[in-house]
Amino acid sequence: MIFSKILNHWYSNNKRELPWRLTKNPYYIWLSEIILQQTQIKQGLPYYESFVEEFPTVFHLAKANESEVLKLWQGLGYYSRARNLHSTARYIVEELQGEFPNSYNGLLKLKGVGDYTASAIASICFNESTAVVDGNVYRVLSRYFGIETAINSSKGAKEFKQLAQTLIDTNNPADYNQAIMEFGAVQCKPQNPDCDICPFNTSCIAFNEHKIHQLPVKIKLSKASKKFFNFLVIISKDKKTILEKRKDKGIWQNLYQFPLIETSNELCFDEFQKILKEMELIKHYDFEVSLYNEDMIIHKLSHQHLYTKFWIVNIENLMEEGIPFNEIHQYPVPILIGNFIENFNF
């Protein structure tokens, strides 16, 4: 089809040089695709390079402790990706003798691998003609064909996948899939796309009908919930503090944080001090408390906004589970905690 020929020609002249484009090793392709889920290339590239250096094969990744993987992932967000990455590496090594499934259907059985990732690996590594559909592809197809079906609806997911499948270059699915994703990232950008030099501008419905900024269509999701987090940064005279591991499912599972008091609204100093005096962790100590940040730090996640205060709690000496200041950087923590640790300069 002429669409795929034009796209492949554009790609051959405009593609960026990226390390995962120099290999068809499924481990590296899988690693790059998991890292780049919900992450831009400029942010994900350093993480990819760090993972390849630290874990050059799936066997190295499988052998690692989860905390090592989470620490290397720190700051990238959506930590379930890192946990799934580690879990899948262990499964591939222990159950599949280190060999990745070589088909779309087989790849779909891996934890953390959905339609898009399975399609990418199957086409790039095994030349299977299965089309990728990610945010870039949704944008390109919705604009070019003037499709107003919401991309975050079940109907939209099915419609765009079927369309993408009819367009794929069956002779070279690897380059075609990478081409359409690259085109969306570089040319048909969300804001200020380069329509004047676009090779599709004469036939693009959105361009010709002045609908570029109306497409793709997305259903508005429910408003993010608001939570109030109060972290206790316990400081002892023998230079120790406390970090706790989050074990419940949800945000930051298996990451470490300072002891947390979550409330339904912002607390003033007196209210917080009353809570501290009843808190089992420190009620048997003499302590002094002060507020580190007068203005709440607002940490925005996809489904919730965390209004955060860090309270400095000075005590004499900690119990045995206290962590020496010089060891605090070894623990995998959410970026919110990581930023505080850097700024506080333990």
Image: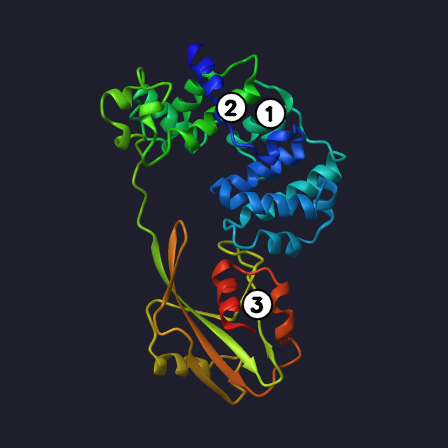
Q: Give the left or right position of residue 330, taking residue 163 as reference.
A: right
Residue furthest right in the image: 97
First reached walking from the N terminus: tag 3 or tag 1: 1
First reached walking from the N terminus: tag 2 or tag 1: 1
Q: Secondary structure at mark 2?
A: helix
- Work out whether 291 lies above or below 190: below
Residue 68's x, y, as percent?
A: 66, 55
Where residue 141 is drawn, which disc sits there? Answer: none
Q: Secondary structure at mark 1?
A: helix
Where residue 124 is drawn, which disc sits there? Answer: 1
Picture quarter containing residue 308? bottom left
Q: Secondary structure at mark 3?
A: strand
Residue furthest bottom in the image: 286
First reached walking from the N terminus: tag 2 or tag 3: 2
> Label 1 amino acid?
Ile
- Work out whether 270 lies above or below 216: below
> Label 2 amino acid?
Asn
- Work out whether 227 lies above or below 301: below
Separation of marks 2 and 3 at Cα, in angstroms: 43 Å
